[in-house]
Image (cartoon, rainbow, N blue to C red):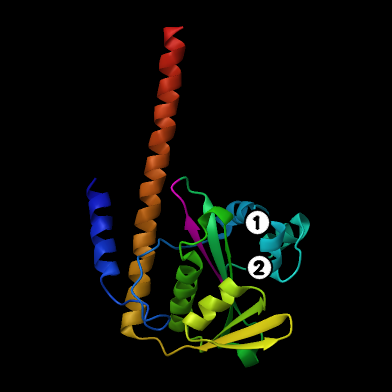
């Protein structure tokens, strides 16, 4: 109970500050975004495989098959890149973002952003939140330019980029957006640390709730069996 009250207090404090200035001047509520690790590959794969054919097309720029998605997940480099995710109360991955760093030394200060959001989670601003989180992390890692390569018909992704102040250039069916990032500051580093701590607290609360629900289900089943 104390952990939940502490987390609520942090959320209230966080929502009262203009914490996304590099991305947006608007004040928006906080969303728990965790950094994902290799142990999350199965959940990442499940999330991406659940995308509709049209959503896969918008996310990858082509009609990705199940096999191509599994290959993409297998090749995710968690040591080089950053993968961020949003979990629901059942600990299902409902949205994720991939911040890929350039492997070319000439472009080592550049990063590319890609995002996917589950169909039932649309309209909650998760894409914006994930982009803001990725921008904050990239800024603190010394990235000076963030790129988004998207299909011109991907209006949602291009809107996120424009709202962040990115320059968008269209070339037929494809568009390129780029956003110049300011140098890291004490404020940007502090916000990222707090983001990580709050997301971890939120995840632990969801985990405890999930374990408690399973215990109740097992107890109910046991009591029912004992009455037979």
Quarter location, residue 34: bottom left
- Alpha-carbon neighbours of circle 2 within 10 Å: few (<14), some, or many (≥20)? many
Mark 1 and 2 residues: CB-CB less than 8 Å, in contact? yes
Q: Say whether residue 83 is magenta.
A: yes
SS class of the residue under badge 2?
Answer: helix
Q: In terms of depth relative to the viewer, which is nearer, 203 or 123?
A: 123
Residue 46 is situated, as x and y percent measured from the top left of the image, at 63, 51
Which residue reaches farthest bottom?
106
* Residue in the image at 55% along x and 63% along y: 96
Q: Earlier in the sequence, mark 1 or mark 2?
A: 1
Quarter of the N terminus within the rendering: top left
As drawn, the label of residue 51 is 1
Is 22 situated left or right of 121 in this image?
Answer: left
Residue 99 visible? The answer is no
Quarter location, residue 175: bottom right
- Alpha-carbon neighbours of circle 1 within 10 Å: few (<14), some, or many (≥20)? some
As drawn, the label of residue 59 is 2
Q: Say whether residue 133 is magenta.
A: no
> What is the magenta range?
82-89
User: For the stretch drawn in magenta, what is the main secondary structure?
Assistant: strand
* Residue in the image at 45% along x and 69% along y: 129
Is 53 situated left or right of 11 in this image?
Answer: right
* Residue in the image at 36% along x and 54% along y: 202
Residue 48 is situated, as x and y percent measured from the top left of the image, at 64, 57
């Amino acid at each position: 109970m104390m952990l939940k009250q502490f987390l609520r207090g942090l959320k209230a404090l966080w929502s009262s500050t203009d914490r996304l200035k590099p991305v947006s001047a608007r004040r928006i509520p906080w969303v728990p975004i965790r950094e994902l690790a290799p142990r999350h590959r199965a959940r990442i794969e499940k999330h991406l495989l659940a995308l509709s054919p049209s959503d896969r097309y918008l996310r990858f720029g082509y009609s990705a098959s199940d096999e191509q998605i599994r290959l993409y997940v297998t090749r995710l480099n968690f040591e080089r890149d950053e993968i961020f995710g949003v979990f629901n109360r059942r600990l299902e991955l409902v949205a994720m973002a991939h911040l890929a760093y350039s492997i070319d030394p000439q472009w080592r200060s550049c990063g590319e952003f890609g995002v996917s959001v589950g169909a039932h989670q649309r309209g909650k601003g998760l894409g914006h939140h994930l982009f803001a989180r990725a921008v904050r992390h990239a800024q603190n890692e010394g990235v000076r330019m963030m790129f988004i390569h998207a299909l011109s018909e991907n209006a949602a992704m291009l809107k996120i980029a424009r709202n962040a102040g990115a320059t968008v250039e269209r070339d037929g069916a494809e568009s390129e957006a780029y956003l110049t990032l300011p140098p890291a500051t004490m404020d940007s580093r502090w916000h990222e640390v707090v983001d990580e701590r709050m997301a971890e607290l939120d995840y632990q609360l969801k985990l405890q709730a999930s374990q408690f629900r399973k215990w109740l289900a097992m107890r109910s089943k046991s009591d029912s069996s004992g009455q037979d």
